[in-house]
Image: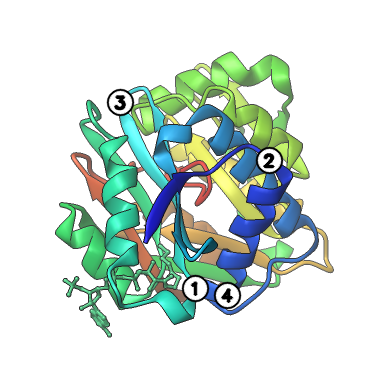
Amino acid sequence: MLLRPVHDSAADTSAVRAIDAAAFGKPLEGREAARADVRTRRLAAADQPGCWFAEEDGAALGVALSLKREGLWGLALLAVRPEGQGQGLGRTLLDHALSYAHGCLRGMIVASEDPRAARRYHAAGFRLHPTMALSGRVDRTGLPATGGIPVHLGDATHFDLLDSVDRRSRGAAHGEDHLALLRTSDELLVADTLGGSGYCYRLGGRVMLLAATSRRVATALLTETLARIPDVETADVRSATAEQDWAVDVAMAAGLTAATRGYLALRGMKPPTHYLPSGAYL
Ligand SMILES: CC(C)(COP(=O)(O)OP(=O)(O)OC[C@H]1O[C@@H](n2cnc3c(N)ncnc32)[C@H](O)[C@@H]1OP(=O)(O)O)[C@@H](O)C(=O)NCCC(=O)NCCS
C-alpha cells in the first residue's frame, strides 16, 4: 500500500468522489456532488498535509480529508472502497490525517453509523456522542415565532461576524471555509442582536451548518430556516446530540421525525451547545 497526498486537481477530485460513492454505496448527485467537489478542492488546497489517498497497484482504494482551523482539527471524510475494507487501510489513513492534528487540542468528526469507523475514532481518543437526524415535511403552522429576533439574509460582508460566532460556539473560526459554504448553499441567514448573534447555511431542505451565541438565537435561526424550506423539499437537520435539545424542540414543533444516526466524535471538547456542525467543514 502506498500513501500519497490528495492534490487540488480535477482528477483527484473525481477519484475522491468515486471512493466516496463505493464506500457509502450511494453516488452523490446534483448539488450534493458539486458541494463535495468544492470541499475536496478547498481542503486539498488549504490542508494538503491532512489529505491522503491509500493506493494499491496505482489504484486509489481509500481517502482521508482533514482540516485544521485555529487549534481545532476536523475529519471531513474517511472512506475505503468495499474491496479494501477491514484490512487496516482506514487505520493507516486516519493515523496520517491525525499527524496533521499536531498542536491541536481539540478534534471533531461527524461520524457515520459504521461500527468500524466508531472503533477507529474511539481508538484515536475521540468520545462518541450519539446523534439524531431530524427530517420530514415542515408543518409551518406548528413553527413558533422567532421570539422577536430579526433574522435576515447574509453574504460575504458578514464573514467577520460569522468567525466571531464560530470562536464563541465551537472555539475556532471557519475562515475561508465560509466562502465555500456560501458558494454551495442556497442561502445564509444571519441574526445579530444585542442579546446574541448567529448564522445558518441552508441547501434545499438541508441545514448545512448553524452556529449561535445563545439558545434564543439558535432557536430563532433554526425556526426561520425551516420556515424557508421550499414545499417540495424534505427538511433534513443532522448531527444533533442531546445537548442540542433546542433543535429537537424546533424540529418537533415543525412536525419532523427524530431518528438516531451516527455520532459526533469529539476529542478535547464537549459538544458545542448552540451548534449544528457541517460534515464537510465541521
Ligand atoms: C469506516 C472505514 C473508513 C474503516 O476503514 P477500514 O479500512 O475498513 O478499517 P480498518 O480495517 O482500519 O479497521 C476496522 C476496525 O473495525 C473492526 N471491525 C470490523 N468489523 C466490525 C464490526 N462489525 N463491529 C465493530 N468493529 C469492527 C476491525 O477489527 C478493525 O479494528 P481493529 O483494527 O482494532 O481490529 C471503512 O470501513 C468505510 O469506508 N466504511 C464505509 C464509509 C464510512 O462509514 N466511513 C466513515 C465515515 S465517518
- SS under mark 1: loop
Q: How far apart are the two marked residues, 4 and 1, measured between alpha carbons?
A: 6 Å
Q: Residue at x 71, y 64 (%)?
A: 141
Q: In the rendered image, which quarter is residue 108 located in?
A: top left
Q: Which is in the foreground here, disc 4 or disc 3?
A: 4
Q: How far apart are the two marked residues, 4 and 2, measured between alpha carbons?
A: 20 Å
Q: Which is in the foreground here, disc 3 or disc 1?
A: 1
Q: How far apart are the two marked residues, 3 and 1, measured between alpha carbons?
A: 31 Å
Q: Is mark 1 within 8 Å of ligand 1?
A: yes
Q: Residue at x 50, y 21 (%)?
A: 163
Amino acid type for the residue under numbered disc 4: Ala
- Categorize mark 2 by other alpha carbons within 10 Å: few (<14), some (14-19), many (20+): few
Residue with the mark numbered 4: 22
Q: Which label number is shown at residue 71? A: 3
Asked whether the beta carbons under mark 4 and mark 1 sit within 8 Å of each other, the answer is yes
Q: Nearer the viewer, residue 189 or 224?
A: 189
Amino acid type for the residue under numbered disc 2: Ser
| 115 lies left or right of 195 | left
Q: How far apart are the two marked residues, 4 and 3, measured between alpha carbons?
A: 32 Å
